[in-house]
Amino acid sequence: MFYKNRTESTEIKMFRSLDGRMQLSPKEKSYFINQVKGYDGEVLFDQQWLTQLPNCTILNDLLLEINNNTFQIDSMIVSDTTNYFFEVKNFEGDFIINDKKWFTVSGTEIQNPLIQLTRSETLLRKLLLELGITTPLVGYVILVNPEFHLYNAPHIPSLIFPNQQSRFLANLSKQLTSPSKKVEKIANQLKAMHITDTRFTKVPSYQFEQLKKGILCGGCGRLIRKSQSGKIVCTCGAIENSTPAILRSIDEYRLLFPERKITTNDIFEWTGGVVSRKVIWRILKQNFAITGHGKSAHYIIKE
């Protein structure tokens, strides 16, 4: 059972919007692509690995802090006998281990995931002990991409390759028991400690005036600046009714500019005039509550 589900991070959502509306630097673009690839790997892990372990308590995407040290746990299984946590990697292609260092075949050094695992284990164990939890803790690096190969790999029990999936899951399943009230309590404690503060994001700085206006296609992510016969039509072939497209754009506006008020004129400008002010006003009136009067009037989420 997924006690804390995995959702796309606020950071990825913000990057996706900005990628369609401004020029990201090569470093920012690379970081964004890697974040999306990492998330895709975690989703694959949920679908192909964790769904085969139905009788357990699973926490995904935990951002925790202890002694001013923050650390992320991709997935964690809480049980009465042993707590397991997983560092999920979606590496693709050929890699080499040399003197405990990891390199691509082209010679670029990457961060050793086993070092990440050790750090997370140390911090997570300290946090659990502070909560009075002494259950044994075991961590694994899970390599989910079937197109991954590691040369010169020594035998490392905490490193699980794609072709070891079936055996690993069968063995893990034997170790797990049905969740107890104690497990539920621990899961609730960890879930409550999850950090949602966006100060940890690497999203570049931006301003409303500098961003390109229009509606981002829900399919390819391209910016659309005109409609056809009341439909939002993208060059990729995607066709969408105006209401869901405008509502998605409003969500995007609220995400990027939480301090700005939602008004007909601002949403009209944000969507690049793809639909008329009258259509914007109708969609806002139907889906939001209005507050204030005259020039101070704006829309808020309905309670």
Image (cartoon, rainbow, N blue to C red):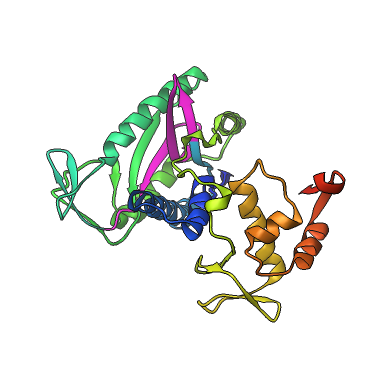
> Where in the figure is residue 31, as x and y percent of width and height?
37, 49
In the picture, measured across the screen, residue 277 lies left or right of residue 159, that is right
Q: Which residues are magenta?
A: 63-92
> Where in the figure is residue 48, as x and y percent of width and height?
44, 57
In the picture, measured across the screen, residue 59 lies left or right of residue 188, that is left
In the picture, measured across the screen, residue 159 lies left or right of residue 47, that is left
Q: Is residue 233 magenta?
A: no
> Where in the figure is residue 256, as x and y percent of width and height?
58, 47
At horizontal 47% and vertical 35% (from top left) the residue drawn is 200
**Front residue of 121 and 98:** 98
Q: Is residue 91 magenta?
A: yes
Q: Say if residue 58 shows up in the picture.
A: yes
**Front residue of 260 and 43:** 260
In this picture, is 146 found above or below 204?
below
Quadrant where the C terminus sits is top right
In this picture, is 90 found above or below 56?
below
